[in-house]
Amino acid sequence: MNQPYPTLYEYFTSPEFQSSVSKINCINTSILRFYLAGVKEKKIQGKRLNKEQIENQLVKLKDISVDQSFDIEYHLSLVEKGCKVYGKNTKTQMKADISYARVFFEFVKNSMSVSSQKEEDETESILPYRQAIMDKSMYKQKSCSVNRQIILQNEPLKFIDELKNKYPHLSQQQLVEKSTESLTQIFDTFNNFAEFRKNEEKLRDRTINTNVDVLRRFFGWCKEELELTIDELSITKIIPVIDPYINNYQDEDEFDDNFMTELAKKEWLLKSKINRNTKSFIKLLNRYFNTYMAETSTGAKVIVCNSLIALTKYLYYDITDEDEGDDYQDIKLINRLKAYRRNLEKDNCDEDDGIVPPFNREETIQVAMRLKKLADQNYEYNSGYKYNRGNKLGKFAKALHLQSFLVIGLMVFMPTDRSRTYRELTFGETLVYGIYNPETGNFTSYDQLAKEEVAKSKYYIHLLPHQYKTGKTYGEFWYQIENIDFGDGTFFYDYLNKWLFEGYRDELATAGKTDAVFIRARSGISFRDSNRSKFGGYVRSIFLRLTKYNLSPHKLRTIFVTYINNLGLSDKERESIAYIMHHSKEMADKVYNKQTSREKMAIGIAFMKQENSLFQAQ
């Protein structure tokens, strides 16, 4: 449609309108019966319009002119008036007819001659939820392999068949008792290990549970790989526990050549036994990584090493001698596992799975702004046609869009922190709203401020040392979230306020009221109280929907660090940003910076061009 039409008749009968909407019969009834009844204040007889009546009504549309002052709300009021002519006196009775009429009137309004920019904005005013804004599917992505679950379960009946083959003379009850006894020994060790880590090392329950889950999977694999029955499986049979000290002391007066020779022989035999068992365990660990975890990321293998080191420390707690070295330096198996872990971490830094995310920061901001538009919508887009906006969105659907925008917005509009910060955000604890004085270190919450002071409140991310990974190094952390002006009359705080104070968060938290900020929609449980992988999966799903690429929170950190390095910031500026991201400048360069060779040379090339231009002036 190149030129605006003079009357409603041309718009209503145009192929552009008739082919661009669904439920055209309902729209016909709304306009030809109720709208024109409001215009003419005259009722048409009969429940359905016949062919002759339709033609007569269409002619009446020719009498209604259209210009740039076309007011949708005025014409909808005529539909409401016409509904009353037909006896529909309540809002509920009128709702459907008004909604169908609005589709037509918005088509008229949008079709009028406007500037190209305004026309583009109108086209995108209602966005299809699953429509991608860019296609990154052609780039290589890390595929997550799904291994058969072999995690060791505390279920005695599961192992009865294998014991029956080994002990055919035992009764069913005896087999159950034997299986129960073996599992009790193993899981008692796991429980004692968990208590040890909690009481002695002061670790979070989440970290301890991860350790135990990893170990149960490892020992489940060992049972199958070594073809052990449940009564043959024991933790100390897999992880060798050998006291490296010979407790055979005598008085110096009794030392003789025979004693020294015997002692040297015992030490040599003990050392050989320790070396042999250590090598055997490392070979077993290699097999585990090369078979069961062959397609798993290097980072996941590091987690396995961490869990095995922690368990080995627990097993050697009463054996190690601090006089011989701190942190179990006298235990060969622990030293060997630490060396193994260092090699894995080096490989992880050097390779990083060989994949550089095909995004720049501008594109991540583009994704965030599309999510903002979705959060601003009041109607769902339930067809492929431009002017069919469908039903009005309910509060739950709006809450889904709002949360997606806030999650990605927080990760994109500020230096990207580790996902734990966003996953565990707790209102009133790690996300606070009020006034903070950095000079005195005092914070006053919004609900303790005078009414005239509340408007000055800011949002802060506040982390204590135990609430983030590098907290022991960097200490207590305060960061003021910027109240970004989006240029359309809205600010970032508007969305945070809406989420926290207008019931949208509670709409998703169906499992019960919570102080956690972000909620899993399907279960109603917070991301904070769920498995940590759920949050990463949520972020990846958002990018997969809008870009057709699985982008993880870790890769968002990579994108941000690469972006600031391309800007050519000073060392002081980069060091400050690294502090906000809770790592060192050196760590940023080693792990997160993914500049290409061309990007690394760009600033130097620009500098040399400027230097060489001096020759032209001479």
Image (cartoon, rainbow, N blue to C red):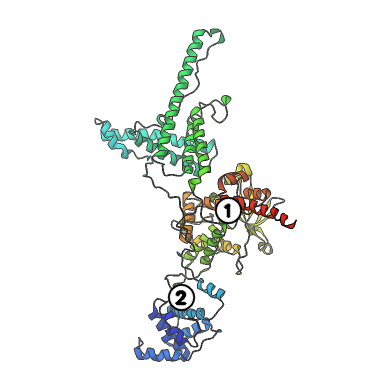
Q: Which of 390 and 170 is in front in this view?
A: 390
| Total residue callouts | 2
Q: Which of 118 and 337 is in front in this view?
A: 118
Q: Name the residue under label 1.
A: 560
In this view, 249 is above or below 205: above
Q: Which of 508 and 472 is in front in this view?
A: 472
Q: Is mark 2 on a helix, strand or loop?
A: loop
**Between marks 1 and 2, how big is the CA–CA gap?**
38 Å
Labels 1 and 2 touching (C-beta < 8 A) = no
Q: Is mark 1 on a helix, strand or loop?
A: helix
Residue extending furthest toward the left: 169
Q: Mark 2 points at which residue?
A: 387
Residue extending furthest toward the right: 618
First in sequence: mark 1 or mark 2?
2
**Which of labels 1 and 2 is toward the front?**
1
Q: Which amino acid does label 2 sit on?
A: Tyr
Q: Nearer the viewer, residue 591 or 538?
A: 591
User: Taking 484 as reference, is 111 left or right?
Assistant: left
Badge 1, how many Cα within 10 Å: few under 14, some, many 20+? many
Q: Can residue 500 be seen in this view?
A: yes
Whole-percent x, y for residue 207 in the image: 50, 42
Q: Who's the residue at 50% across and 35% down the image?
A: 196
In this view, 382 is above or below 362: below
